[in-house]
Image (cartoon, rainbow, N blue to C red):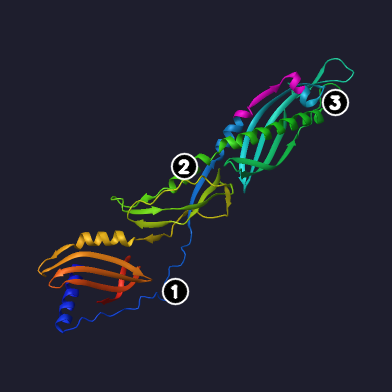
Amino acid sequence: MKRLVAALAGAGVLTACGGQLAVPVPNLEPRTGAMLPPAEPAVIVLPISISLGKIRSVMSAQFPAADSLTRSQCIALGGALCHQYVYRRDSLELRMNGDRVELLARLRYRGRVALVGMPGLASCGYAPEEMKRAELRAATALYWRNDWRLASRNTSLAATLPDPCQVTVLKLDATPLMRHIVDGQLEKLKQQLDSALPALADLRPSADSLWRALLQPIALDSASTVWLSMQPENIALARPLGRGDALTTALVITGRPRASIGARPAGDRRPLPTLGLAPPTGSGIHIPVDIELPFADLSAKVTQLMKGEIAGKDLTVDDVKIWGVGDTAVVRVVVHGTVRGDLYLLGRVQYDAATRRVLVSDPKYT
């Protein structure tokens, strides 16, 4: 830049010696289409994975591997004939199919029932018989509630009893009674699943913390002179989907970021917006940035770098002012010494993608 000022000074001297200082007046009207198009929104996609093992462990705790019903519990589920129900759970399987979680519980059971009009109890599944088999199935669709917690809907329930429950007295078939008890157990399992899911995943604290962080400018250099303001607009969660042994979703944030040079921009205090549903999307961060370079800050910085005498030129730079009109940059350098006055450079501002630099093309010196 100092060589540029020296060249400008030399041109000024030669022109002055000719008896006239010609000052061309460039056309500062912006070219058609020279205004920057609106930047596309920034999109930040943060993938989130929740292990199905967490749901499985919660369900295992609420649906113990072995249990029995008291007589009052048995009567509440099976009616007055029910006297005892005992089960042993063999397995508890969870898997995802799209946004639906499917549960399969295999168990074995035995029970005692009272006989109508007869004293005593009859039983099935007790020694020397083997315990009877049953399968409990539940499937439910997962979605995000407005409070950022998981919830379930459109739940389907089914119980299968492959082995008939023929009680030992008179071979009375107690299978319908046992099915009624197992159905009640399955309904209880559904309630446990519905209550466990919201407590399993609460993403609001994390989302709120991230939202508040994005509302504050971020310094991009160690001197805190270049700032990135994300200016987030929306935040949403992708539909929960199963992938392998995990439930996956994504936190999607859109904004209108801009970079500025100079003083720290003011932050924002907007609350976390209402949760929205994000369309299916990949992962990654895409941040197109509008960059703002205040002319006042730029002028002060260049003046600081150039102010003073240019070695060997008998010329001193007093002040530098930079401004723009449309896509044209104007530089005014105030000097004294060999030449006293204002020197100007005007040119079109362009960005060179290869060198990643802002350049001034077609310069005009006055």
Q: Position of residue 229 (x, y in %)?
A: 41, 53
Dot placed on the residue nearer the N-terminal end, 3 or 1: 1
| Secondary structure state at the residue bearing disc 2 | helix
Quarter the N terminus occupies: bottom left
Check whether the beta carbons of the residues at disc 3 and disc 1 lie within 8 A of each other.
Answer: no
| Secondary structure state at the residue bearing disc 1 | loop
Q: Which residue is mark 3?
A: 172
- Could you say which disc has been placed on residue 33 in the image? 1
Kind of residue at badge 1: Gly
**Residue lying at 19% horizontally and 63% vertically, measured from the top left:** 306
**Residue lying at 74% horizontally and 22% vertically, measured from the top left:** 73
| Magenta-colored span | 61-74
Q: Which residue is mark 2?
A: 209
User: Looking at the image, is mark 1 or mark 2 nearer the viewer?
Assistant: 1
Q: Quadrant of residue 79?
A: top right
Q: Residues within 10 Å of mark 1 (few under 14, many from 20)?
A: few
Q: Which is nearer the eye, 202 or 98?
A: 202
Image side of residue 87 versus residue 209, left or right: right
- Is 210 rendered above or below residue 261? above
